[in-house]
Amino acid sequence: FSTWSTLEAAPPDPILGLNEVFKKDPNPKKVLLGMGVYRDNENKPYILNCIRKAEQIIIDRKMDHEYAGIQGIDSFIANALKLAYGADSQLLKDGRVAGAQSISGTGSIRLGFDFLSQFYPNKQAEVLVPNPTWPVHRTIPGKVGMKAVQYRYYDPKTRGLDFQGLQEDLDKAKNDSIVLFHVCAHNPTGVDPTPAQWKDILEVVKRKNHFVCFDSAYQGFASGDLQKDAYSLNLFTSEYDRIMLFQSFAKNFGIYGQRAGCLSLVTGSKKETEVVMSRVKELARAFYSNPPIHGARLVDIVLSDPALTNEWHSELKVMSGRMATMRTGLVENLKARGSQHSWRHITDQIGMFAYTGLTKEMVDELRAKYSIYMSGEGRISICGLNTHNLEYISDAFHAVTK
Ligand code: PLP
């Protein structure tokens, strides 16, 4: 007997599993619509010019490879917080935000939930996450001994937000629960509340005294407008302070593998910020000691230089613009083929993903007959669409939905 002979294998990751099958498909027309990574119109990774320039600056300045502090690179943290909370944020001016660089979005979420599991005063609090959500939102609370439960979010009938269900579920939950929201560009549905709906959601949250976790993985990448994409967060922070934020810079800077992210918590005072920071650092120290420096440096260099920041803004518009064009293109092509379905949800939804409404059977048929790969629930990554494959994909979508 070996030590691990009775250990059962973990279930395979559904998205990564899809890639493996895709790679083996010999069809030259095959299309992968599964992965959450940006691709340009030639289906190639897009390296932002501002990032290329920042890389050159690192070399030119002969920057060293010393350890960052446990909390990460201070100027990166300051820039990240300004980006999210706003340059004029009173909370930042008052020193009421505790921020720590962490390992992209996922690592920030893990560190944040580690913190909540140990220090959130209400030990019975459940974590409410949208149904559906990015699966890691459910697994992380479980890994730190907390319980994740779902609140209604997506309505398959309207292919939009189940606003009433959402409000009812947040209202029904015990006071003091922990609620997770996507700041914008909800993954996997692409469905976000409207500004007016966010205001109503804030009212429920305040009445119930829920603690709010905001996941920000797509700021600027969704609409091309950084402020517009941070609307929900900024609305909440203007009136409420039971807030924690997870920022990822993977998508909006195109630096997926560099793992640059930031965890932050709103506190009651500068003094409280120091206490919270000491505890966050205590956790990070036993987790990874200090975060990786390269990606955070790249972001910091871009955000510290007005010319590079401007260039970044233009590149965000290029990426978000291409995704918007592909959404419209897909709907127009389907209409041109005589599709009688309303595909409006595709253009109403925003960000990297669309919930097409295709059934499991249709998804299987697309894979078997056309070598078009997407996850079982009919989610497509808009970045997989380009002007070379749009007609082919539209033909196939029309054929399976006739
Ligand atoms: N949160 C959401 C909703 C996401 O979609 C992603 C990436 O797909 C992340 C967080 C975090 O990604 P990363 O850990 O690469 O920053």
Image (cartoon, rainbow, N blue to C red):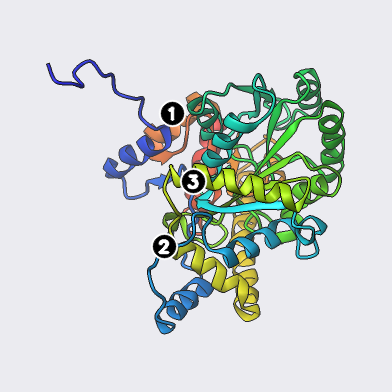
* Tag 2–tag 1 contact (CB < 8 Å): no
Q: Of circles 2 and 1, which is in front?
A: 2
Q: Is residue 349 above or below residue 135?
A: below
Q: Which residue is mark 3?
A: 284
Which label belongs to residue 267? none
- Cα separation, mark 3 vs mark 2, equals 14 Å
The secondary element bearing badge 2 is classed as: loop
Q: Does the image show residue 394?
A: no
Quarter of the image that includes the N terminus: top left
- Cα separation, mark 2 vs mark 1, equals 49 Å
Quarter of the image that includes the C terminus: top right
Q: Does the image show residue 60?
A: yes
Q: Sequence-wise, which precedes: disc 3 or disc 2?
A: 2
* Residue placed most toward the observer, 303 or 53: 303
Return the residue found at the far left. 1
Q: Which residue is mark 1?
A: 364
Q: Which residue is mark 2?
A: 67
| Whether the residue under disc 1 has CB within 8 Å of ligand 1 | no
